Image (spheres, grey):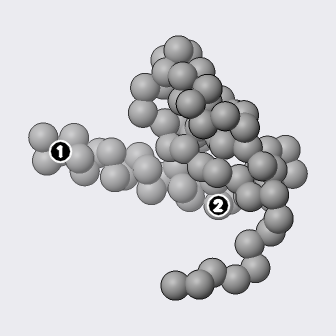
Amino acid sequence: MASEVAATKESCAAELDWVEANRETIAARYAGEFIAVDGHAIVAHGRDLHAVMSSARDTGHPRPLIVAVPTEPITRLHV
């Protein structure tokens, strides 16, 4: 179980790195949408979160990273 959690964390970190490296392209193509990322690929996208998750599952990606792509650039985060 612990090794499965560690593998999931590593996968999520790698997917987040990929999203960050491709953020400009992602923002231009998918603004205002949810994207489902598995590995180094967007496996589903759309404005309806439930539909994006269902589409990802239906195409063999049961646990993708889900990202909400903002419509405007993020210039400041409040913590």
For the view shown, which residue lies furthest in the left direction? 1
Task: Count the labels in the image.
Answer: 2
Crowd tier of the residue under label 2, counting other residues whose Cα lies within 10 Å: few below 14, some 14–19, many 20 or above: few
Residue beneath label 1, please? 3
Query: 43 or 55, which is in the foreground?
Result: 55
Q: Is residue 25 visible?
A: no
Please report the residue visible at 74 percent of the width from the left and 72 percent of the height from the top: 74
Relative to 22, is 37 above or below? Answer: above
**How far across and how far down the image is residue 18, in percent?**
61, 52
Relative to 41, is 13 above or below? Answer: below
* Lateral position of residue 59 relative to residue 28, left or right: left
Crowd tier of the residue under label 1, counting other residues whose Cα lies within 10 Å: few below 14, some 14–19, many 20 or above: few
Q: Is residue 37 visible?
A: yes
Badge 2 or badge 1: first in the primary sequence: 1
**How far across and how far down the image is residue 33, in percent?**
73, 44
SS class, disc 2 = helix
Name the kind of residue labelled 2 in the image.
Glu
Please report the residue visible at 81 percent of the width from the left and 50 percent of the height from the top: 31
**How far across and how far down the image is residue 34, in percent?**
66, 43
* Lateral position of residue 10 relative to residue 76, left or right: left
Residue beneath label 2, please? 20
**How far across and how far down the image is residue 5, in percent?**
23, 47
SS class, disc 1 = helix
Name the kind of residue labelled 1 in the image.
Ser
Please report the residue visible at 70 percent of the width from the left and 83 percent of the height from the top: 76
Relative to 19, is 46 above or below? Answer: above
Query: 46 or 41, which is in the foreground?
Result: 46
Asked if the residues shown at circle 2 and circle 1 are in contact, with their CB atoms under 8 angstroms apart, the answer is no
